[in-house]
Amino acid sequence: MIRFNSDYTEGCHTAILEKLVETNMEQTAGYGEDEYCGQARELIRKACGDERVDVHFLVGGTQTNVTVISAALKHYQGVITAKTGHINVHETGALEACGHKCLCIETPDGKLTARQIAAYTDAHFADESFEHMVQPKMVYISNPTEIGTIYKKAELEAIYQVCKKRGLYLFMDGARLGYGLMCKENDLTLSDITVNTDVFYIGGTKVGALFGEAVVIRNEELKKDFRYNIKQRGGMLAKGRLLGIQFLTLFEENRYFDISAHAARLAEKLKDELTKMGVKFYIDSPTNQQFPILPDAVLAELKKKYSFAYQERMDETHSAVRFCTCWATKEENVDMLLADIQKLLKADEIEA
């Protein structure tokens, strides 16, 4: 079975494994206070262009989202998110389980706009019963989004200005951040993200690491006592050096960006070649997640050889599915997938 169903189907980059083996018998301090975490923090600060940011390493994405949001909010406050946001649809209600509501906005492309955020917040405080409803205090965005779209620099700047004007924290989920930064349509840098959010995280689990995410906090209000919340929410690793070594290795020699560019290139190839075949797409995604609409008969045959994710039924005979490329995707597997789709589409046309 060749897997395109997600971007965490392999282990980790071989350079990480080599470094883990090399350092295996060293004794270090625990809980992220070792020298490798320290070195990784410095590399990330340099990449972000800000030596003042706090950098924390957590074990996974859901733990990171719950930790960041719960640390920032009071018990009566909630977080504005697109309805498709990961915290709303794919974390088993983890945020609600710790007492914070997802305040959802419908969006056509998985992205929030500055206007939507302003309108939602203004409507809350314009209601004479506002104190009887969950108060919006944070905005959660993903980049790339859960359906592969990205925020442009002007969009992010506009959102952050609205957030600052209305006293909202802006939090960016960067589980797939590398794939967004390295796609052709992107005009954001890590430095741009740093100065236009209060807190964000750099995803490792889906971008070359065995596991782990790096939280970057710029807002001074959110820095205080953050490690207490990491521990309480189950995000702190006793052998923290395992996270430090991974992020140190990823941010050495431009590795994080190079392996992300590989995934972006193969996704673009997949999209371009399918477009040439006349295939339509559920969403115009420039990143490593592609959502072609294919005949159900074709998908039934593809399932015998490939793993992919179902997205949505489009009509009686067609469905949208998701194919993911990643840092480890083999180009020959993409070529094989394309060849098989082309063959099956021709066969489907003949039968029709």
Image (cartoon, rainbow, N blue to C red):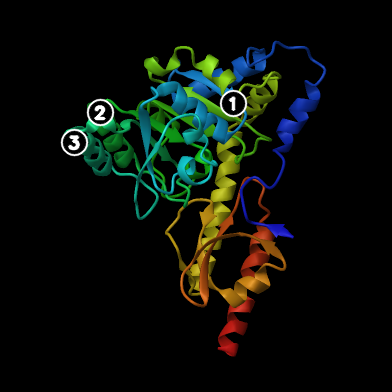
Which residue is at 69% across, 35% downward?
A: 210
Q: CA distance from mark 2 to mark 3?
A: 9 Å
Instruction: Name the quadrant containing residue 227.
Output: top right
- x, y percent for residue 254: 58, 33
Under circle 1, the secondary element is: strand
Which residue reaches farthest right?
25
Looking at numbered disc 1 in the image, what kind of residue is underneath it? Leu
Q: In which quadrant of the rendered image does the N terminus lie?
A: bottom right
- Circle on res. 190: none
Sequence-earlier tag: 3 or 1: 1
- x, y percent for residue 183: 48, 48
Q: CA distance from mark 1 to mark 2?
A: 34 Å
- Circle on res. 131: 2
Q: CA distance from mark 3 to mark 1?
A: 39 Å
Question: In the picture provided, is 13 more to the left or to the right than 192?
Answer: right
Kindly identify which residue carries mark 3.
Answer: 127
Under circle 3, the secondary element is: loop
Which residue is at 25% across, 33% downward?
A: 162
Which residue is at 27% across, 27% downward?
A: 164
Kindly identify which residue carries mark 1.
Answer: 58
- x, y percent for residue 108: 35, 55
